Image (tube, rainbow, N blue to C red):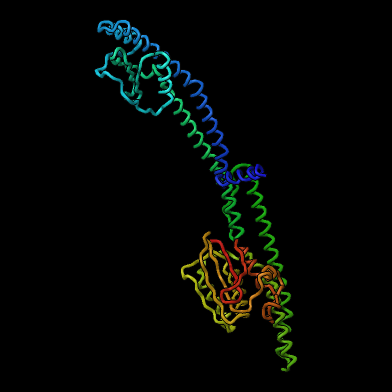
Amino acid sequence: MKLRALKIYIPRQIKRWLPTSLFGRSLLIIILPIALMQIAVTWVFFDAHWQTVTSRLSDGLAGDIAWAVESYQDDPTPDALARIAERAQNSMSLSIALSPNKALPEQRPSSLFAALDRSIDRALSEHLDVPFWFDTTRFPGYVDIRVLVHDEVLRIIAPRDRAYATQGHIFVLWMTVATLLLTAIAILFIRNQVRAIERLADAAEAFGKGGDVPDFKPYGAREVRRAAQAFLAMKTRILRHIEQRTAMLASVSHDLRTPLTRLKLELALAEPSKRLQAMKGDLAEMEHMIDEYLAFARGEGGEAVETVTLKDLIQEVSEGAARAGAVVTIDIDPEMTLAVRPGALKRALSNLVMNAAVHGEHVAVSARPTTAGGVEILVDDDGPGIPAEAYADAFRPFNRLDESRNQNDKGVGLGLAIARDVARGHGGEVTLDRSPMGGLRAIVRLPG
C-alpha cells in the first residue's frame, strides 16, 4: 500500500511544476530533450576526453618536474641549477629558480576547477617523494609549483596548457551557444503555431458571448486550419438557425397577436359586466404568457454587443419593481461598465428584480468586481426564500415552486430560466443562495 501511494503522490507533485499552457508544454517537449542531450554530451566530453587529456598532461608535467628535482638533488650547486634551468626552459618550457622563501606556504588557494587541482596533486604525489605546493590561480596562463629540496624551495613556473587541456571552455561555449540558438528557433516556431490556436480560442469565446468575429481567418498548421474552418462552418450554421428561428417566432407572434387583438377589440365594445372583466383578465394573462413563451424561445440571440453603464441599466430595471410597491436600494459603482447585449441583460435582471419585488418588500441590488476580471451582480430580497435543495429545480422552465414562494398570478415559471439563459449566452452564470436579508439571493456572474 505504501509503494502504491508513493506512485500516485510523485506524479501529482511533478504536475504542479509543469507548465499549463500549450506554448509552455510544447517548449518543454523540445527544449528538455535538447538540454538533456547537451548535458550528456558535455558530461561524456569531460569524463572521457577532457579529464583523460588533463590527466596525461599532468603526468607529463609531473615527470619533467621530478627530473628537475632529482637532477638538483644529485648536484645542488648553482652551476648545476643553471644548467637544469636552461635545459628545462629550452626543452620543456619550464622556468626553474630557487625561491627566496625557505619554507612552503601553509595553505593552497582554492580553485574554481577543483578537478584540475586534484589531477595535478595526484600526478605530483606519484612522481615526487618530497613536500610540494602549487597554485593554479595566481597567474592566468601559468601554474606556480614549489618543491622543498635540501631545505630550499625550488620554484617552477609551468605554462597552464602543459598542466591541463585549456580548450575545454570553448567546447562548453559552443554547446551553450548552440542550445540558446536552438531554443530561440523553437520559441519562434512554437509561438507562431500557438498564436493561431489562441486566435481561434478568442474567436470562439467572442462568438459564444454574442459578439461577431468578421476578421477571423484560418491560418497556422493544417490541423489548426481545419479546426478554424470547422468553427466558421459551425458559426454559419448557428447564425442561419438563429435567423430562421427569429423569422419563425416573428411569424408566430404575428399570428397569435392578431386574434388576441380582435378579442380585445370585441371585449372593449361589449357591455360592461363582471363576466366581461373576468374575460379581460384571462385575455391579459394569456397575452402575458405568450410574451413569456416567445421571449424564452427567442433568447435575444441576435442582439449586438454594446458597452453600457451598469448602474444606469439597473436603475432602469428597478423602476418597475418600485412601481410594484417594493423598496429598492442600489449599491453599484457609477463607473462600472460592461460589454453586453443590453436588451437581453435588461430582461434577465428585470426578471430577477421583479421576482424579488413580488416575493419581498425590500430589494437590494449590488455589484462587485470578481478576481477573474468580471462582475458579480447580487439581487437580494427579504421574502420567504426557497430551500437550498430546490435551487436547481428553480431554474427548470415552467417550475414555479409554489410551496416555497408566494403565488405569482401572471408568472409561468420562466423568469429564472430566461435569466440563466441570458447569463450563459454572455459566458456567465446565475446561481442562487440564502440572502443576508432573510430571503433569496440571485447571483449573476458575467465575464469582463
Asked whether 48 or 420 is in front, the reply is: 48
Q: Is residue 173 found left or right of 341 in the rendered image?
A: left
Q: Residue 30: x and y, percent?
A: 56, 37
Q: Quadrant of the N terminus?
A: top right
Q: Against 428, is 143 above or below?
A: above
Q: In this rendering, is residue 433 above or below 166?
A: below
Name which residue lies at 55% across and 81% down. 327
> Which residue sits at x=74%, y=80%?
259
**Given the current orientation, which residue lies at the most extreme front position?**
151
Q: Relative to residue 150, is residue 199 depicted above or below?
A: below
Residue in the picture at 67% in, 63% down: 243
Hey, which quadrant is residue 29 in on the image? top right
What is the x, y in percent for residue 134? 35, 21
Decide if residue 327 is on the left or right side of residue 154: right
Tell me where residue 123 sits by quadrant.
top left
- Location of residue 106 in the rendering, given as x and y in whole percent from the top left corner: 32, 25
Which one is nearer the viewer's eye here, 126 or 262? 126
Residue 293 placed where, x, y %? 70, 73
Q: Quadrant of residue 295?
A: bottom right
Residue in view at x 59 percent, y 56 percent: 205
